[in-house]
Image (tube, rainbow, N blue to C red):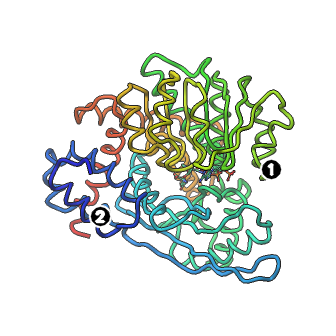
């Protein structure tokens, strides 16, 4: 533990004792507490009211059985969760992840981070995350439908448009949101904004699909422009080839960059001429296939299978900008060293917590522009909140209107993080800046409520 302040050390020790097997959650908490070292001496009122002690404990953690029947009529059981982390500044809000790795530690880290991210958007949304250890890969649409219906049959009693509003994350996209919303509407007999990322024909917002990836590029653009640089002519490496990665690639290319690599959980493609994104969309979004199929059409490109140690090979490709958009802890210290040595000038996190602590330290020390997830990928949830507003008003804005709001929000987030970093004595350190700016709004609300 690298914390120096004795109060924060005690907070961390208590969290570590209470959640001893939850490495991802502890990693996320430690990073935020490190940033709060710059705050606690200036804000004894928050310490006295135990705000930080309360903030590191989720308000509610729900776990439930999800029974369903596969296409062979065989009963299956998964574990479903919803972590309602913090509702100080608005209804709980955050995605659902369906992936075999899902457990309480991963969802608690995601719910904790979501609390600060949502605060940074400037909108009235609290923090949550949920999901199940269900693997949608290789399942038929009918199996996914039955799973989603069973999942919602339990979840519906814990959510509502003014209580908790889930959305997508890894393994939960338009198809799953459709099945989940259909079941909610049927059981609750309510057509409300209880989920975001909905289809356009039933209350979804234009530009929500693109929002996380586009928002990541708007944030990165702002970070670059602050240093007199732009995307134009830069080589960009992006990990993942899901919702976030694909729309990050689309916007980076529109801003004049060349996206030279993308990946999935099995391996990565390297296409120095610039990836053919229309082909990637067909392979990954339409066919739910493997990225390896790319080189069957684009024969000049290379495909590399992941080594047994995971998907790190992509970070050895020489690039100017790296956008990790797959999953947590996908950039370790060695990857960071390789990126720095290859001359990479900016790293912005589309995924949640993709960089390990040692990697972040290296980026900051080397002067690489670093956009932390809580700030850089907040465009998705911000546009979810915009979807909620449209639903509440029972009207819808155009793509251009939503995109303009998204851009404004990303610029504001950059400025808030930049300002907080300067105010607290670490100018340009957006990790500390984002953590502090996100924290202060939530903390002040918690202070106002007394001990709750
Ligand atoms: P998708 O399911 O659409 O895509 C995930 C991509 O990452 C896929 O290419 C997948 O490969 C790859 N991937 C997933 N898990 C692993 C793993 N353990 N190892 C290697 N590769 C993996 O998810 P999203 O694009 O929505 O989410 C990506 C990241 O962005 C996540 O960290 C998520 O929390 C974060 N995020 C998402 C937001 C959203 O609005 N959707 C908003 C903010 C952050 P394969 O195709 O083989 O499964
Ligand atoms: O990590 C995230 O911010 C998301 N998965 C999006 C959450 C949302 O409610 O849109």
Circles 2, 1 touching at the beta carbon (< 8 Å): no
Residue at position x 46%, y 48% in the image: 353
Residue at position x 35%, y 67% in the image: 20
Quadrant of the rendered structure where residue 131 is? bottom right
Q: Position of residue 228 (x, y in %)?
A: 46, 16
Q: Is residue 44 above or below residue 19?
A: above
Q: Report the Cα–Cα distance between label 2 and label 1.
A: 43 Å
Q: Nearer the viewer, residue 389 or 341?
A: 341
Residue most extreme to the front: 308
Q: Which residue is mark 1?
A: 286
Callout 1 secondary element: helix
Left or right, residue 77 beside residue 361:
right
Q: Which residue is mark 2?
A: 15
Q: Nearer the viewer, residue 197 or 333?
A: 333
Tell me, yes or no, if residue 126 can be seen here: no
* Pointer 1 residue Cβ closer than 8 Å to ligand 1: no
Tell me, yes or no, if residue 315 can be seen here: yes
Q: Is residue 347 above or below residue 126?
A: above
Quadrant of the rendered structure where residue 304 is? top right
Q: Is residue 348 above or below residue 255?
A: below
The quadrant of the rendering that contains the C terminus is bottom left
Q: Which mark is residue 437?
A: none
Q: Position of residue 341 (x, y in %)?
A: 48, 24
Left or right, residue 144 beside residue 373:
right
Q: Is residue 443 above or below residue 326?
A: below
Which one is in front in this view, the residue at disc 2 or the one at disc 1?
A: 2
Question: Would you call the spot at circle 2 few (<14 residues within 10 Å), some (14-19), or many (20 or more)?
Answer: some
Q: Position of residue 19 (x, y in %)?
A: 35, 67
């Amino acid at each position: 533990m690298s914390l120096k302040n004795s109060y924060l050390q005690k907070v961390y020790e208590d969290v570590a004792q209470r959640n001893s097997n939850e490495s991802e959650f502890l990693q996320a908490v430690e990073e935020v507490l490190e940033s709060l070292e710059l705050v606690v001496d200036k804000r004894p009122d928050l310490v006295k009211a135990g705000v930080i002690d309360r903030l590191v404990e989720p308000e509610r953690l729900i776990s439930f059985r999800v029974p369903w029947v596969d296409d062979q009529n065989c009963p299956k059981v998964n574990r479903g969760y919803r972590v309602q982390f913090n509702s100080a500044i608005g209804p709980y809000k955050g995605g659902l992840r369906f992936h075999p790795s899902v457990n309480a530690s991963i969802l608690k880290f995601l719910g904790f981070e979501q609390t600060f991210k949502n605060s940074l958007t400037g909108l009235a949304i609290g923090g949550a995350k949920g999901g199940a250890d269900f693997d949608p890969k290789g399942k038929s649409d009918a199996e996914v439908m039955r799973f989603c219906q069973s999942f919602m049959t339990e979840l519906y009693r814990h959510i509502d448009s003014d209580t908790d509003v889930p959305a997508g994350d890894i393994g939960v996209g338009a198809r799953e949101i459709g099945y989940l919303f259909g079941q909610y509407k049927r059981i609750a007999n309510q057509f409300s904004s209880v989920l975001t990322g909905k289809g356009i024909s039933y209350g979804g917002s234009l530009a929500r699909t693109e929002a996380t990836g586009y928002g990541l590029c708007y944030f990165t653009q702002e970070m670059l422009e602050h240093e007199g640089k732009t995307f134009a002519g830069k080589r960009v490496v992006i990990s993942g080839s899901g919702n976030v990665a694909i729309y990050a690639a689309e916007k980076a290319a529109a801003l004049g960059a060349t996206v030279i690599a993308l990946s999935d959980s099995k391996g990565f493609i390297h296409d120095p001429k610039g990836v053919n994104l229309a082909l990637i969309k067909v392979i990954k979004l339409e066919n739910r296939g493997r990225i390896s199929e790319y080189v069957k059409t684009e024969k000049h490109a290379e495909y590399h299978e992941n080594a047994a140690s995971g998907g790190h090979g992509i970070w050895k490709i020489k690039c100017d900008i790296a956008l990790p958009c797959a999953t947590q802890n996908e950039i370790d210290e060695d990857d960071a060293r390789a990126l720095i040595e290859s001359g990479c000038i900016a790293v912005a996190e589309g995924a949640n917590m993709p960089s390990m602590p040692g990697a972040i330290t290296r980026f900051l020390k080397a002067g690489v522009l670093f956009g932390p997830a809580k700030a850089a990928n907040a465009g998705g949830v911000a546009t979810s909140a915009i979807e909620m507003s449209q639903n509440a008003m029972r009207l819808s804005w155009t793509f251009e209107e939503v995109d303009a709001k998204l851009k404004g929000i990303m610029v504001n987030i950059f400025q808030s993080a930049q300002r907080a970093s300067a105010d607290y004595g670490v100018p340009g350190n957006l990790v500390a800046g984002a953590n502090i700016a996100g924290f202060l709004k939530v903390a002040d609300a918690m202070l106002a409520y007394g001990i709750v």
